[in-house]
């Protein structure tokens, strides 16, 4: 097994986005501005509905992909291309904004725990003006491997040639 050297440990900052959703941002802060293609990584999570109920009303994106992974709770995605999808626990939403898209992500539930992550990935210049797309991948569709005491869910790429 190869060794990985930790170069820097950065504490996430508490902030809000959308219509006031409280979150912790670990990529996209001044201490981590050098890790292109990764632009932003947010963790959102709370049992207090006031921290998330206003959601992320319609807003634009261009030239990026967003990957959202939900641990608890549910979000509904709707966009300007006519795509709709409900993202639940263990599911992934993969949106390619490319040439431009307007979308919203709103909590479906009115109470209970909401917890998930969203990663923003910069697209290569040659693909930034491509047609936008959207995928909603339910938990049961995501390949899962158990490795000793760990469970690994593969949302992109390969693991052990699968």
Image (tube, rainbow, N blue to C red):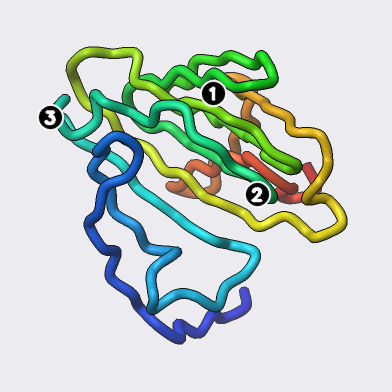
Q: CA distance from mark 1 to mark 3?
A: 25 Å
Residue position marked by numbered label 1 in the rendering? 139
Q: Splitting the image into 4 quarters, where does residue 65 fall?
A: top right
What is the secondary structure assignment of the residue under circle 2? strand
For residue 153, above or below residue 126: above
Q: CA distance from mark 3 to mark 2?
A: 30 Å
Q: Position of residue 89 (x, y in %)?
A: 41, 24
* Mark number displayed over residue 48: 3
| Left or right of residue 148, residue 47 in this image | left
Q: Splitting the image into 4 quarters, where does residue 100 fall?
A: top right
Q: Splitting the image into 4 quarters, where does residue 155 fall?
A: top right
* Mark number displayed over residue 73: none
| Left or right of residue 135, residue 109 in this image | left
* Closer-to-camera residue (159/131): 131
| Left or right of residue 50, residue 99 in this image | right
What is the secondary structure assignment of the residue under circle 3? loop
Q: Quarter of the image for the N terminus: give it.
A: bottom right
Crowdedness near tag 2: few (<14), some (14–19) or many (≥20) residues, C-alpha within 10 Å: many
For residue 105, above or below residue 18: above
Of the two numbered discs 3 and 2 on the same chain, state the one appearing first in sequence. 3
Crowdedness near tag 3: few (<14), some (14–19) or many (≥20) residues, C-alpha within 10 Å: few
| Left or right of residue 111, residue 19 in this image | right
Q: Position of residue 138 (x, y in %)?
A: 57, 20
What is the secondary structure assignment of the residue under circle 1? helix
């Amino acid at each position: 097994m190869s060794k990985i050297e930790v170069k820097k440990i950065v504490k996430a900052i508490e902030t809000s986005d959308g219509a006031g959703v409280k979150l912790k941002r670990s990529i996209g802060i001044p201490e981590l501005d050098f890790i292109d293609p990764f632009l932003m990584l947010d963790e959102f999570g709370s049992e207090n509905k006031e921290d998330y109920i206003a959601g992320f009303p319609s807003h634009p994106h261009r030239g990026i992909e967003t990957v959202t992974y939900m641990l608890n709770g549910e979000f509904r995605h709707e966009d300007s291309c006519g795509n709709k999808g409900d993202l639940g626990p263990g599911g992934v939403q993969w949106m390619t904004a490319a040439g431009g898209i307007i979308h919203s992500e709103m909590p479906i539930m009115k109470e209970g725990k909401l917890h998930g992550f969203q990663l923003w990935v910069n697209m290569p210049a040659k693909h930034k003006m491509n047609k936008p797309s959207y995928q909603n991948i339910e938990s049961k569709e995501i390949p899962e491997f158990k490795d000793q005491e760990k469970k690994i869910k593969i949302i992109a790429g390969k693991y052990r040639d699968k």
